[in-house]
Image (cartoon, rainbow, N blue to C red):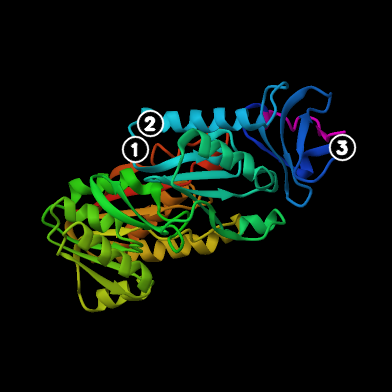
Amino acid sequence: MSYTVYLKKNEEKRILNGHSWVYANEVAKIEGKDKNGSLATVCDFNGRFIGKGYINHLSKILVRIFIRNINDEANLEFYKTRISAANDYRVKLGYTDCYRMVFAEADNLPALIIDKYHDIFSVQFLSLGIEQNKELILQSLVELFAPRGIYERSDVAVREKEGLPLSKGWIYGDCDTRVIVEENGLKMIVDLEKGQKTGYFLDQKENRFALRKYVKDATVLDCFCNSGGFALNAAAAGAKEITALDISKQALSDVEANAKLNDFENITTACGDVFEVLRDYRKANKTYDVIILDPPAFCKTASEVKNAYKGYKDINLLAMKLVNRGGFLVTSSCSHYMTFPLFESMLIEAAKESGRSVRSVELRTQACDHPSLLAAEETLYLKFFVLHIV
């Protein structure tokens, strides 16, 4: 007999509005018995059906609901229909060579990430239930798209909270882990094995293109440059000189390879801790027309927000002092705990302390292939500000 989970009184409102997570402390009782990771039915306190999702007794998120019709089952056709619908949305918006095909909760497939890099998929299985249905998902991808290969990047800490080991490697096909894709008319080498996330930061794609109108004939500093997405877009838009700065030698090697691939000769690299390097530049009176800050998440839990705020403020304050008058600071945060209001408050404080006059000229979020659910604030995470230093 499968599990039936009954919520406490009034705990169903958030889920009925479209959120998929059922926390263990919201549950009144559980009836039935099945294996961990199986499909469970969720009801309100009075027994009214709410949805179905995979259960995991080891996780604070007890159930991740993704079925709202009582007659639906999570079989092959179900997955093919959901994945196909998710892909159709991206294709309709004009995505072709590289994009996020499935964005977990936002595509009603919680804990499943599928990214397309040319003819190869990079995937993450982030919950016990999704892990146990991996073969169905792989079969769906093969039957729908016939990819050349599927690479798993389930090497993220969230799996440990699900009681799962980290996993990485080819699960379909066996290809070169470095694949060339096209983004914004540029060629990019994506390293599926060693690259960040699933190989590349796809969520900044449109923001990288938006950078172009601010950098013509400018000296540009791309901080936390990773494989050089912003630097390459700056070069394509006619920037005079670009410095790509990162602490990772591998990242800088990727920048150099991508610059060569696109015949850009005005991109140089610098290796070092961004905080320390910016302080050194300040002491040396070194300035730039445009500075880009695209750091990794400074906070991954709510308890880390206070320290993260200090870190964001520190680095943005430093950057504001290094931008030439009339230039731009392009700054972002990818932590959903650092909310838009909080991030903006930090920038206001930094601007006051910098002694510079700062205008906000553009505010953006993640690319359209990373849609966010209004009912799930966790799915809206990327903040992207363009500030004018006047």
Given this view, does label 3 or label 1 mark the residue nearer the observer?
A: 1
Marker disc for residue 381: none
- Residue tagged 1: 96
Marker disc for residue 91: 2
Report the amino acid beneath label 2: Val
Q: What's drawn in magenta, residue-wise?
A: 1-15
Give the CA distance from mark 2 to mark 3. 43 Å
Q: Secondary structure at mark 2?
A: helix
**Residue 356 shows in this picture:** no
Q: Is residue 4 shown in magenta?
A: yes
Examine the image and state in which quarter residue 47 appears.
Answer: top right
Examine the image and state in which quarter residue 356 appears.
Answer: bottom left
Residue drawn at point x = 67 percent, y = 59 percent: 160
Give the CA distance from mark 3 to mark 1. 46 Å
Q: Position of residue 301 (x, y in %)?
A: 59, 56
Q: Is residue 97 placed above or below 195 in the rendered structure?
A: above
Q: Position of residue 32 (x, y in %)?
A: 89, 35
Label 3 CA crowd tier, 10 Å (few <14, some 14–19, many 20+): few
